[in-house]
Image (spheres, rainbow, N blue to C red):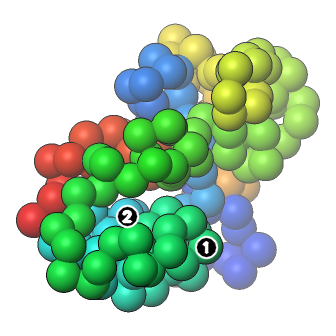
Amino acid sequence: MTTHHPNTQRLVYGHATNYDCLAFIDADTAVGEAAEIRALAAARTWGEARQVQMTHLSNPAGPDCYEPEDYADDKPFDITEVGAVVEGYWPAMVTTRALDMLPQDLQDRYGKIVLTTHNGEYLEVPLDREAEVVAELRRRGYEVTRDDDLINLLDGVSLGSLAA
């Protein structure tokens, strides 16, 4: 376990394949979010899916989204058939997080805002700017780690292949 200064901002970044650009996320919540996505994807029935505890994300199979009487507890569950997943709203686009995670001057220098039809805007940071932006973040005291698999999991890539 790496020890870090309590005020150090820790970021995970990687190549978001859906957008072919870099994405930046909060390292302190990323692992918990990934565990929630994996747990939901592994649910075999709607009952199991409803019981997945979410602290970082909303549960797209939960009572806020589906009436329990419409989907019996023993009905087989497939995450790729959940409305919010099909429509691309869950999990939220991972590339939007750079708008909160990166300092404004770095957003302006290395990225550009892209507006999507359904999911709002995100920051597109080109892959070829990786070395510069990472060096600049580290110069400012950020702890920065690359993890493409984690970035794409949090973006909902290949959710079906996570199913049990």
Residue 153 image point, x, y percent: 36, 49
Task: Identify the image quadrant of the N terminus.
Answer: bottom left
Instruction: Give the camera-side residue of 9 and 22.
Output: 22
**Above or below, 35 relative to 9:** below
Q: Quadrant of residue 16?
A: top left
> From this viewpoint, is residue 137 visible?
no
For badge 2, the amino acid type reads Ile
Marks 2/1: CA–CA distance? 17 Å
Residue 81, image x and y in percent? 31, 48
Along the horizontal axis of the image, is 39 left or right of 27? left
Marks 2 and 1, the one that precedes in the sequence: 2
Residue positioned 58% across, 15% down in the render: 126
Quarter-of-image position of residue 35? bottom left
Residue 64 image label: 1
* 124 sits left or right of 75 in the view: right
For image coordinates 68% across by 45% down, the residue present is 97
For mark 1, give the secondary structure: loop
- What's the amino acid at mark 1? Asp
Side of 80 relative to 36 (left or right): left
Is residue 82 visible in this depiction of the protein? yes
Residue 135 in picture, x, y percent from top left? 62, 34
Q: Can you say which quadrant of the picture contains the C terminus?
A: bottom left
Q: Which residue is mark 2?
A: 37
State the image coordinates of residue 43 (x, y, percent, origin top left): 22, 73
Q: Residue furthest left?
A: 164
Q: Which residue occupies the foreground of this view, 135 or 70? A: 70
Along the horizontal axis of the image, is 62 left or right of 26? left
Other-residue count near label 1 (Cα within 10 Å), few / some / many at <14 / 14–19 / ≥20? few
Q: Residue furthest right?
A: 105
Nearest to viewer (mark 2 / mark 1)? 1
